[in-house]
Amino acid sequence: MLSKKNRHLLPLIGALFTLYIVWGSTYFAIRVGVEGWPPLMMAGVRFLVAGFLLFVLLLLRGYPLPTLKQWMAAAVIGILLLAVGNGLVTIAQHQQVPSGIAAVMVATVPLFTLGFSLFWGMRNSRLEWTGIALGLLGIVLLNTGNNLVGNPMGALLILLASASWAFGSLLSAKVSLPAGPMAGAAEMLVAGVVLTIISQLSGEHLDKMPSFSAFMALSYLIVFGSMLAISAYMFLLKNVRPVVATSYAYVNPVVAVLLGVGFAGESLTLREWVALVIIVAAVVLVTLGKYLFPKPAKTGRVSE
């Protein structure tokens, strides 16, 4: 029999593991998908289908319909996290930003989270500021590497996506979202509608039927990258600090780079490998620094 404490920890561990591994693999899936789908169309279909399926499943399980206030909150968070955050990353990968490089850039989310947390009066420690400075150094190195030096727009899109995701993650803890996984379902529905409308307005269309691999990539993104992983992320945002919830960012680049190098023929220069190590180290520092380098306990003088 599991203790009460372990029963509480298991969902947290499972949610973190899902984000670490599943979201790390979605960059490769997006790369495969955008070879057959227009980027905004693919992102819109992904979230519309995932949101609808999850929404219906939750209604059948007895979850209440979100109130108007909850729909409004879900719309704001869905646009920040999914329509802007994920949508811009999908566009950047369609512009030939390698999946591994995209994941390394998105690893800056916890650093943006620390910066935006100042708006809510959360003070950062010297250790966390050191991590931010280290992360900025990694970003500079990465943007001067071969994969991004000729694609400044792709780099800018991913940085904007990371900032939007970080701000939305912090804001989600301050607004009244639907209960449990219904929050993720509502956010995906709204983001799917927004992305589909923008896709149509921008003139995206299919020139030919997407390949089998592109369909499989989209299916993976719908089931695992959206229905499963986004539900896990919303669960974490309500149960742990935002910096911990975004700690997936220091594992995702490793998973994405390995998949990109192993299956997509991507390659990183020495400068980009160094940047990867620096950014991962920075994110580890801001998320786990206080545990790795605890402050020494203050000892008072004992009076004789």
Image (cartoon, rainbow, N blue to C red):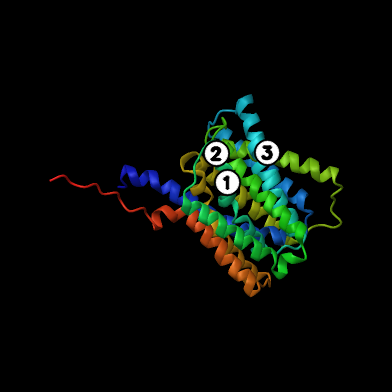
Cβ atoms at labels 1 and 2 below 8 Å apart: no
Q: Residue at x 72, y 51 (%)?
A: 88
Q: Judging from the image, what secondary structure is the residue with disc 3 in?
A: helix
Tell me: residue 97, above or below residue 294. Answer: below
| Camera-side mark, 1 or 3 | 1
Q: Is residue 148 left or right of residue 275?
A: right
Local crowd at mark 2 within 10 Å, few (<14), some, or many (≥20)?
many
Earlier in the chain: of badge 3 and badge 2, it is 2
Report the Cα–Cα distance between label 1 and label 3.
29 Å
| Nearest the eye: 292 or 8 | 292
Which mark is drawn over residue 189?
Answer: 3
Residue 35 visible? The answer is no
Report the Cα–Cα distance between label 3 and label 2.
13 Å
Q: Quadrant of residue 5?
A: top left
Determine which residue is flagged by label 2. Answer: 181
Q: Is residue 222 left or right of residue 9?
A: right
Q: Quadrant of residue 34?
A: bottom right
How many numbered discs? 3
Residue 130 visible? The answer is yes
Q: Position of residue 273 (x, y in %)?
A: 60, 70
Cβ atoms at labels 1 and 3 below 8 Å apart: no
Q: Position of residue 9 (x, y in %)?
A: 39, 47
User: Mark 1 belongs to which amino acid?
Assistant: Gly
Which mark is drawn over residue 150?
Answer: none
Determine which residue is flagged by label 1. Answer: 115
| Nearest the eye: 206 or 87 | 87
Report the Cα–Cα distance between label 1 and label 2.
28 Å
User: Mark 2 belongs to which amino acid?
Assistant: Pro
Q: Residue at x 55, y 41 (%)?
A: 118
| Camera-side mark, 1 or 2 | 1
Q: Residue at x 77, y 43 (%)?
A: 196
